[in-house]
Amino acid sequence: MKPVYRVWLVGVILALLLSGCGVVDFLRQLDAAGQASDDVLPSAPSLPAGTPLPPLSDLAAGLEQLTSYRVTFELQVGSGSGGDTVSILQEINRETGDTHYRMASSGPSGEAVFEYFIQGSDFYLLTQQGSQPPICNLMTSGGERTRQQGQALTPDQLFGPIQPDRLVAPGELLNGLITDRYTVDLGRMELGAGSGQSAEVWIAREGGFVVRFSGEAEGVISGLPAAGSPEGSSRWAYELQSVNSLGAIHLPGECQTARDIAASIPIHPDARERTSVSGVTTYLSDLDPSGLAEFYLAELERGGWSVSETLRLDSLVILQASRSGLSLEISIARQTEDTGSQVMIQER
């Protein structure tokens, strides 16, 4: 198995187990009604004899042609009470700029969930501890991390380059798309020396992206958690659904509350390098602390906040504000003797 996949899978499971998140239902049957049967289309043109195997060199580029879609991925290792399961859901709607990602694990070491939403430059991280209600933290930066989190999930990111081996069914209709089905050479993908290996890939006739990649193997599969166990088994399924037909991605209630609170806090129009993480917002401004203090006194009072000053110096102003059970502490500090201020707003 490719080293990058070993690192990814170990990282997935460690991140999930360390997150301390609570139990959320897995996604094995998600959108089952929307998955069309694997019918061969009589009218679909056959591939000409001698057609070379598709290279599948840049699967993300194929998905970038789509306006919206849903991807599900499930990996099961072992069986019964000793098995592990990792399930991933990704939804992308480029028309609205929204992304939803959810990853869940289940096994002898426990169950955990990691979930986030991206709307524009806003990144919402949803976590849950035990039986406690979920908590949503809003993180706003618009930086490279947010763009990377919104990138397409493709099977080569999980397994390494997919190696089609033999065309077995041209012109199959799968999830509303015309696909060509191939067997996959797991040996060339360096997935180990397990017995009874089999895998197939369905490739969209238009666009060249993977619509389904599924497989199973008994025995040792290099890099998977059951590696080293002769009794181990592995099964996986990657599925592309709702192509160009995905509906709106809605924030859960906890994230809507975080969004509404953030929208109620004034931000000066000349703010730059703005970042919000877990109830703390910071930004830079060209104004001095006194000018920004006057801005906040006026804007907060106009918005129905009760505001008071706890400190006012030439280089530092601290304000306290409260409204409807929410309290803010606004610290405005001069950066240097002659260049603007740094603002920090803490929600309490």
Image (cartoon, helix red, strand yellow):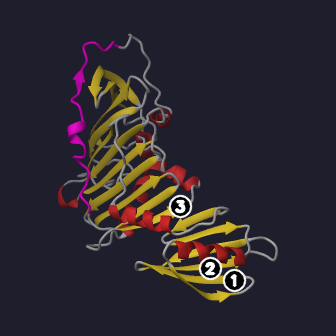
- Residue at the (38%, 10%) spot, across then down: 49
Nearer the observer: mark 2 or 3; the answer is 2
- Please name the residue shown 35% across and 65% down the image: 254
Region in magenta: 24-46
User: Which residue is under mark 2?
Assistant: 331
Q: Quadrant of residue 214?
A: top left
Which residue is tagged 3? 140
Image position of 109 with respect to 166: above or below: below
Label 1: element kind: strand
Q: Earlier in the sequence, mark 1 or mark 2?
A: 1
Q: Is residue 142 depicted above or below 235 in this figure?
A: below
Q: Which mark is residue 316?
A: 1
Residue drawn at x 43%, y 64% is 260
Q: The residue under label 1 is which amino acid type? A: Leu
Disc 1 and disc 3: Cα gap in Å? 25 Å
Label 3, secondary structure: give it.
Answer: strand
